[in-house]
């Protein structure tokens, strides 16, 4: 496995996120102040639910899962984090503690950005603040959609929603990689692993998906959309 190189600094980065592209050179220097980068191996905790929230994180390379720890050690996966996504709110801005955990799924390079420096730049650049609010609003909207899916849809509809999200938003491909385990799908859809596996096998039997080892390939996106709509 190739070792991920550490980031040299926000103001020198040639692969900035769309959000950071809005910033001037001087504003990037502020964001870069007190910044540090860390390489995480699969399974290592990047952020821990309940700890003091003093930094934002930006995933530079790799892949991670964001989840909440509930009762009886049950987990609800909130999202999957891929490169150039910014994670930290709402804990950084109004709660003081992280309300979720983030764990590396594969070798992942993360930059930690000081929350006070980030907030300073929000006050300096109105366009950056607008873009950040838009990003947070989009995340909130997806959270509401998840609430509807989890509370009102049957298990088949919830699995369909998960597969659609993973293929369209995360992988941008009809193939879901082996990093996403069957347990991940169960935790994302709030059901048992056995139930998730059973429904995936039903989808394979109906030729909606193909299961190849740890990967999943969507064969019939239209039928998947229909299952999602009908719940």
Image: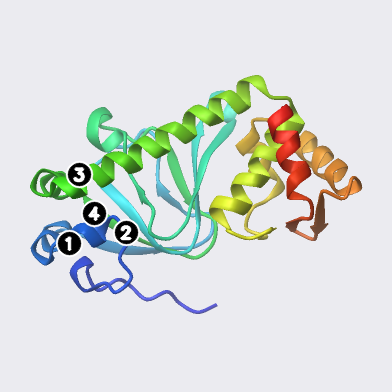
Colouring style: rainbow
Residue identifier under label 4: 113
Q: Earlier in the sequence, mark 4 or mark 3?
A: 4
Q: Residue 44, how many percent across, how many down?
A: 48, 54
**From what the image shows, is residue 119 above or below residue 151?**
below
Secondary structure of the residue carrying tag 1 is: helix
- Residues marked 4 and 3 touching at CB (< 8 Å): no
Secondary structure of the residue carrying tag 2 is: loop
**From what the image shows, is residue 211 above or below residue 109?**
above
Q: How many marks?
A: 4
Q: Residue 130, how many percent across, how many down?
A: 23, 42
Q: Nearer the viewer, mark 1 or mark 3?
A: 3
Residue shown at 71%/40% (left/top)? 225
Q: Is residue 195 left or right of residue 173?
A: right
Residue identifier under label 1: 32
Secondary structure of the residue carrying tag 4 is: strand
Q: Earlier in the sequence, mark 3 or mark 2?
A: 2
Residue shown at 62%/26% (left/top)? 150
């Amino acid at each position: 496995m190739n070792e991920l190189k550490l980031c040299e600094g926000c103001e020198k980065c040639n692969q900035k996120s769309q959000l950071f592209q809005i910033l001037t050179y001087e504003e990037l220097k502020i964001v870069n102040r007190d910044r540090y980068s860390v390489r995480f191996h699969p399974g290592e905790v990047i952020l821990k639910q309940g700890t003091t929230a003093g930094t934002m994180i930006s995933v530079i390379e790799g892949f991670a899962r964001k989840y909440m720890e509930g009762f009886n050690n049950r987990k609800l996966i909130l999202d999957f984090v891929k490169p150039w996504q910014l994670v930290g709110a709402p804990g950084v801005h109004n709660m003081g503690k992280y309300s979720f955990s983030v764990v590396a799924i594969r070798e992942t390079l993360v930059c930690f950005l000081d929350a006070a420096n980030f907030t300073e730049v929000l006050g300096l650049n109105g366009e950056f603040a607008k873009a950040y609010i838009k990003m947070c609003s989009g995340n909130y909207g997806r959270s509401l959609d998840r609430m509807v899916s989890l509370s009102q849809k049957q298990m088949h509809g919830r699995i369909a929603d998960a597969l659609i999200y993973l293929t369209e938003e995360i992988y941008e491909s009809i193939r879901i990689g082996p990093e996403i385990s069957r347990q991940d799908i169960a935790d994302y859809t709030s059901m048992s692993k056995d139930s998730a596996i059973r429904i995936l096998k039903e989808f394979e039997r109906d030729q909606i998906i193909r299961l190849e080892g740890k990967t999943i390939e969507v064969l019939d996106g239209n039928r998947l959309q229909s299952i999602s709509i009908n719940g």
